[in-house]
Image: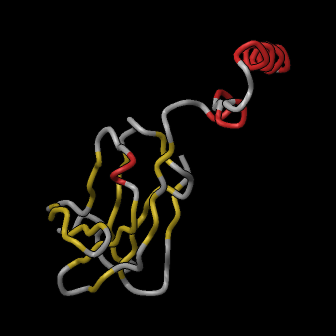
Amino acid sequence: MVNLTVTGGSVILQSPVLPVMEGDDVTLLCKTKTTPSNLPAAFYKDGSLIRKQPTGHMTIQHVSRSDEGLYKCDISGHGESPSSWITVTGNTPPHLHLQHHLHLPPRLLLLSLCCHVLDQ
């Protein structure tokens, strides 16, 4: 897992930098640069309050495409973090995506899949 820390203000939102897979759990951490990282924080998605967490972290369980969006957090008395975009991808591994093969007739699609698997 790769995390991105955006700096600039006194409040930081740590979130995944790479797209997360549907069904995975994602933890967001809201902290300040100067005080302990377990301060109560409010988490927002696309400008709307999701929930307030007493420990400064929030886990989104079993993410879906509807969880994709722009997240930020706020720690009372310290300010708001910059926004961070979270991307959610399908739960099929990228090498198994068939979108570029769907225009093929069934026999060619099967042949293409066999060759793709053999190349792996």
In the picture shown, does residue 11 fall above or below 114? below
Quadrant in the picture for the C terminus: top right
Q: Residue 15 versus residue 120: which sits nearer the camera? A: 120
In the picture shown, does residue 78 fall above or below 35? below
Residue at figure coordinates x 20%, y 60% from the top left = 55
Residue at figure coordinates x 40%, y 56% from the top left = 68
The reply, left or right, for residue 71 in relation to residue 8 is left
| Rendering quarter of residue 118 | top right
In the picture shown, does residue 103 fall above or below 115? below
Q: Residue 69 versus residue 58: which sits nearer the camera? A: 69
Residue at figure coordinates x 49%, y 79% from the top left = 7
The x, y position of residue 105, in whole percent, is 73, 21
| Number of marks | 0
The reply, left or right, for residue 14 in relation to residue 53 is right
The reply, left or right, for residue 1 in relation to residue 72 is right
Residue at figure coordinates x 26%, y 85% from the top left = 78
The reply, left or right, for residue 46 in relation to residue 95 is left
Q: Residue 28 versus residue 107: which sits nearer the camera? A: 107
The colour style of the image is secondary structure
In the picture shown, does residue 107 fall above or below 116? above
The x, y position of residue 82, in whole percent, is 41, 79
The x, y position of residue 59, in whole percent, is 28, 49
Outermost residue toward the front?
105
The x, y position of residue 72, in whole percent, is 34, 72
